[in-house]
Amino acid sequence: MAPSSLLVFDHSTRRVALLHDGDEAERAALRRDIVYALRGPVPPRRAPGGFTSPVPTFDQAGFEASVEAVQRHIRAGDVFQLVLSARLEGACDLDPFEVYRALRLLNPSPYMFFCALPDGVHTIGSSPEALVRLEGRTATLRPIAGTRPRGADPAADAALADELLADDKERAEHVMLVDLARNDLGRVAAAGTVRVEPYRIIERYSHVMHTVSGVEARLADGLDAFDLFAAAFPAGTVSGAPKVRAIELIDELEPARRGLYAGTVGYFGADADGHPGGMDQAIAIRTLILHGGRYAMQAGAGIVADSVPEREYHEVMAKAAALGAALRLAERGL
């Protein structure tokens, strides 16, 4: 979609800015409408509603069997790593915006989004991971690979972080995906400008912690945001390596099509002449879809040769936990 009007709320200053691609009379009318809405009564909230417990497309035994199938493909040389995901679904008549408010409270992340789309579809997310960002001519990818649940107290949390950083399997997987990001970016970067900074740091969220790196370069002359997006999509962190074969195997092994999961939510900018400008695209993970009285959420785990199937299943459930908690909080009422 290409919006003609944007309202930008600055959480630091608590000021609202109106951006409108139109004449002054239209802007003045919009300003009046906004002031009227802000000064008017707060609309009443609808009754909280409810939801049913999520039912996974994979039960634990089925997921673990698919992990073992992936490992057979790894031993055969088809892939080095593959991200296997499971969808969880249920009935839901909660207010979508209350679910977003609950998720924002429970799992604040770099990319929070609430999209009311045609046909009553609502997309609600708190993604920790950028696919790719373009600011000026600087392109950035931030691969996330390596996960642990949060500890019950600060000491346990620190111990889990230390274990994650020391884990040889997690380190090897992270290095592989950073190299994949470097290769993706290198296809469209000016020669000699690709660098990794920071490298394998811990980022903590409400229910999990991750190891994260940054890969940055200057976009080559003559290329734009669309070239950069095409080089980076889909992220290796939600598909695998090599990407094409990993995607083919995902299509064979996962019982439900992914839909928006592992796609992106973000924007492409434009300059005053309408030429492509900046871009910021979040990977659609930690994301809920509400539609037709149903909800769906999905999470995945990176599978390598020495993955432990049971542990990978529990990683998927830990990643989905924040979304389930948001549904429960919205049901109780904020």
Image (cartoon, helix red, strand yellow):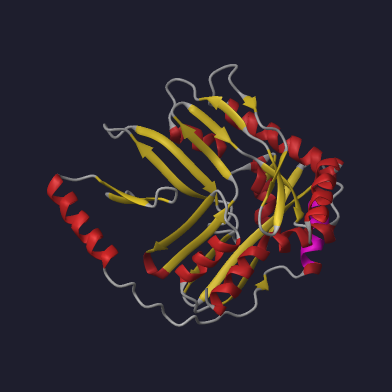
Q: Is residue 86 visible to the viewer in this orientation of the structure?
A: no
Specify the quadrant of the image occupied by residue 285: bottom right
Among the 4 quarters of the image, the one containing residue 150: bottom right
Tell me the residue at 72%/68% (across/down). 58
Residue 198 sits above or below residue 114 on the image? above
Q: Residue furthest left?
A: 25
Q: Nearer the viewer, residue 173 or 125?
A: 125
Q: Residue at x 40, y 70 (%)?
A: 120
Image location of residue 136, percent across then percent down = 43, 28
* Above or below, comparing residue 277 to residue 330 in the picture: above
Picture coordinates of residue 73 (x, y %)? Answer: 80, 48
Examine the rendering and report whether any part of residue 319 can be seen. Answer: yes
Decide which of 38, 198 is in the foreground and name it. 38
Q: Residue at x 37, y 39 (%)?
A: 269
> Residue 332: where, in percent of width, then height?
56, 79
Specify start and end residues of the magenta stretch as a single range: 62-71
User: Which one is in front, 51 or 75?
Assistant: 51
Residue 170: which quarter of the image? top right
Residue 221 is situated, as x and y percent measured from the top left of the image, at 45, 20
Q: Is residue 235 left or right of residue 210?
A: left
Query: Magenta region, mostly helix, strand or loop?
Result: helix
Front residue (pair 89, 47): 47
| Left or right placement of residue 12 versus residue 180 in this view | left
Residue 69: say if magenta. Answer: yes
Residue in the picture at 60% in, 32% down: 184
Number of numbered discs on residues: 0
Report the residue that reaches farthest toward the front: 13
Q: Is residue 195 left or right of residue 21?
A: right
Magenta residue check for 174: no
Left or right, 75 with respect to 241, comes to right
